Image (cartoon, rainbow, N blue to C red):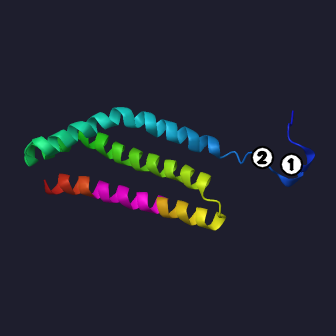
Amino acid sequence: MDYRSPLARVRGLGSAKTGTSHWWMQRVTAVALIPLSFSLIIFLDLSLNAPYQETVAWLASPFNTVCIVAWILAVFYHAALGLQVVIEDYIAVEGVKIVAVWAVNLSFLLLALAALIAVFRTLLIG
């Protein structure tokens, strides 16, 4: 059963069918960040209170490295999704909206790459 008016059907107005995946990815990354944040808290505690070599040794453990890398990927992706929604909701001009979303996505991509490089550089140089 179609609830759209005949005019809306002709114009093709209605759901673009893309918001569901965006919504789900925000929820999935939010739930994934809950346990991953415990590893980050331990890492930050070690960074502030333990000697450098002990922190690097903790980070060199494969499980801890995977947790920190997963946290970096999830948090930057989650932040990009959230800011995209804010931009889409509050910027009215379509061209500015597109450029702003691209700028946010590119910024978070570069920040995530910088964070990953820092983690792997720390592991390699030790």
Residue 74: where, in percent of width, then height? 41, 44
Residue at point 45%, 39% (across, down): 29
Residue 35 sits above or below residue 92 on the image: above
| Residue at the extreme right | 6
Identity, as a three-letter code, of the amino acid under mark 1? Ala
Whether tag 1 and tag 2 are in contact, CB under 8 A, the answer is yes
* Quadrant into which the N terminus falls: top right
Q: Residues within 10 Å of mark 1 (few under 14, many from 20)?
A: few
Residue 104: in sight, yes or no?
Answer: yes
Residue 107 sits above or below residue 9 on the image: below
Residue at point 65%, 64% (across, down): 93
Residue 63: in sight, yes or no?
Answer: no
Q: Main secondary structure of the magenta part?
A: helix
Residue 126 left/right relative to 41: left
> SS class of the residue under badge 2?
loop
Residue at point 80%, 50% (across, down): 13
Res 121 quadrant in image: bottom left
Res 65 quadrant in image: top left
> SS class of the residue under badge 1?
helix
Residue 17: where, in percent of width, then height? 69, 45
Name the residue tied to disc 2.
14
Identity, as a three-letter code, of the amino acid under mark 2? Gly
Q: CA distance from mark 1 to mark 2?
A: 7 Å
Residue 118 sits above or below residue 28 on the image: below
Q: Could you tell which of marks 1 and 2 lies nearer the N-terminus?
A: 1
Q: Residue 8: give its label.
A: 1
Whether the magenta-drawn stretch holds residue 112 is answered as: yes
> What range of the chain is rendered magenta?
105-117
Residue 107 sits above or below residue 74 on the image: below
